[in-house]
Amino acid sequence: MNIPDLVFLTGPFGGGLVLTILSWTVIAVVKRPRWVYILGVTLTAVFVWSFVAYWFLWGKAFDYADADKPVPARIDFASNVSMTLCSLAALALVVLAAAAVLAKRRAGGKLERTATPAHHL
C-alpha cells in the first residue's frame, strides 16, 4: 500500500472523525434543545457503526484479494453502503451544528433554555 492509497482510505473517514468531534463541540457550546442532542447521538451512532462496518468489510475483501479470489459482490456492495452511510452521517452532523449556530444568531445571540433532568422532576 502506497501513500495515495492510504490517504484515499483514511481521508474521508479521518475527516469524518474530526468533523464529528467539531460538530459535537459546536452543538454543546450553543446549547440547543434536547431533540438536537438526540438527533446528534443518532447520527453519531450511524457514523460509528458504519465506520466499523466499513473497515471490517474492507478486511474481508482484503483477505479475498490476498488469496487471489474475487471479492464477492455482496461484500463490495455492503462496503459501499457503509462508506456512504458514514459520509452522510458526518455531513448531517455538520449541517446540524451549522443549523444550531444559525438558530442562535437568529435568536439574537441569546442562549435558549434547555431541558435538564432537574426541570422534569
Image (cartoon, rainbow, N blue to C red):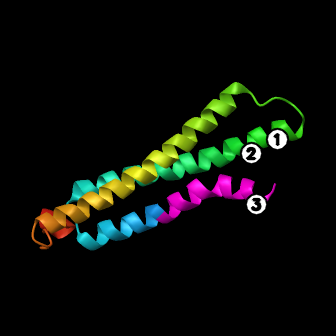
Q: Secondary structure at mark 3?
A: helix
- Residue 59 numbered mark, or none: 2
Q: Secondary structure at mark 1?
A: helix
Q: Kindly report the distance in space between the C-alpha atoms of the residues bearing marks 1 and 3.
A: 21 Å
Q: Kindly report the distance in space between the C-alpha atoms of the residues bearing marks 3 and 2.
A: 18 Å
Does 95 sit above or below residue 56?
below
Q: Kindly report the distance in space between the C-alpha atoms of the residues bearing marks 2 and 1.
A: 6 Å
Q: Is residue 113 left or right of residue 30?
A: left
Q: Amino acid at mark 3?
A: Ile
Q: For residue 41, which quarter of the picture?
A: bottom left
Residue at 52 percent across and 41 percent down: it is 84
Task: Report whether residue 88 is seen.
Answer: yes
Q: Is residue 81 magenta?
A: no
Residue carrying label 1? 63
Residue carrying label 3? 3
Does 78 sit above or below residue 116?
above
Task: Report whether residue 121 is seen.
Answer: no
Part of the protein shown in magenta: 1-18
Please report whichever mark, 1 or 3, sits nearer to the chain's N-terminal start: 3
Q: Nearer the viewer, residue 87 or 55?
A: 87
